[in-house]
Image: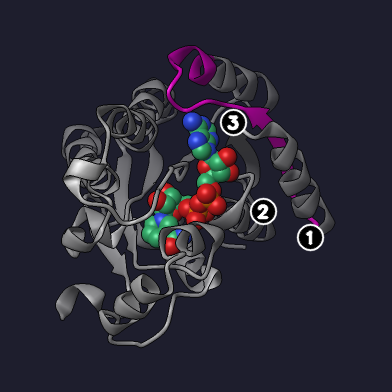
Amino acid sequence: MRLEGKRAIVTGGANGLGAAIARRFAVEGARVAIADIDDRAGMVSADAVATAGGQACSLRLDVTREEDWALVVADLAKRWGGIDILVNNAAIASGLTRIEDRSPEDWDRSMAINAKGPFLGTRMLLPVFRRQGGGTIVNISSVAGLGQSQIMDPAYACSKAALTMLTRITAAQHADEGVRCNSIHPGPIDSDLARIAYSDGDAFARRLLRLPLGRLAKIDEVVSAILFLASDESSYITGAALPVDGAALVQ
Ligand SMILES: NC(=O)c1ccc[n+]([C@@H]2O[C@H](COP(=O)([O-])OP(=O)(O)OC[C@H]3O[C@@H](n4cnc5c(N)ncnc54)[C@H](O)[C@@H]3O)[C@@H](O)[C@H]2O)c1
């Protein structure tokens, strides 16, 4: 059990990658809070964890709202007495676009959910980690946050680049308090989000050409890397940006 005794929050844990993280963390011994704006799907995700023999609860959280974060942290303090792992996974993405086709409102929404949300979560969890003598954050960024951004939605790519820097700053400022913070940078995953982003068949074919492994990532391949960074196996790794991208970024 690689997460025996750990208590984890997974934002966006109701669907897609987040639901798979919640299941795998629970199978590895963690108690998991599925924190999502879609609380109905969150309950289904929590039931799936229970069916797999793990422990999970579903809590409603809009990552852009500070007051929601405060309620989630207070609830978990009562339920579990603390939190050891935060996975900032919730995000939105839209199809590939050019700058002039993105409205200022789209930009603000992407930044609010994909960048400000993880900032609020980090800000809320740091005092908890400090009291406990440490904790671990895994930020789910993207290859768009490191490169290949020219073929992405500009609002998505810039929000993920902000998350890459938030990771480094968190790691540098809080290492002496036992806090580790790393980011994962998946290429396209075989998921609903990728199907929306590449709904145009030509765009999908062009995307595959930029993936040396020649295929999308399987969700479990990405979850394995997240599990490693969340667990004590990566105890000397902090401030790192780990691509899980089929060599997309080294092309
Ligand atoms: N799918 C891919 O190809 C891919 C590639 C690279 C990175 N990623 C990243 O992986 C993560 C998960 O992606 P996914 O494919 O599972 O997406 P998804 O759309 O299937 O799931 C995202 C989840 O976030 C939740 N969410 C959205 N807005 C929220 C908010 N304001 N507050 C709380 N929850 C909110 C949704 O309800 C949903 O459950 C994202 O950070 C995404 O950017 C995905």
Which residue was labeled with disc 2? Answer: 26
The yes-or-no answer for disc 3 within 8 Å of ligand 1 is yes
Q: For the point 69% across and 25% down, which residue is it?
A: 79
The label nearer to you, 2 versus 3, is 3
Magenta stretch bounds = 53-70
Is any atom of residue 91 visible in this view?
A: yes
Farthest residue in the right direction? 51
Which residue was labeled with disc 3? Answer: 37
Q: Position of residue 47 (x, y in %)?
A: 80, 47
The quadrant holding residue 133 is top left
**Does dot 3 land on a helix, a strand or a loop?**
loop
Q: Position of residue 201 (x, y in %)?
A: 43, 74
Q: Position of residue 28 (x, y in %)?
A: 63, 60
Is any atom of residue 8 visible in this view?
A: no
Residue 192 covered by magenta stretch? no
Which residue was labeled with disc 1? Answer: 52
Nearer-N-terminus badge (2/1)? 2
Q: Position of residue 130 (x, y in %)?
A: 36, 25
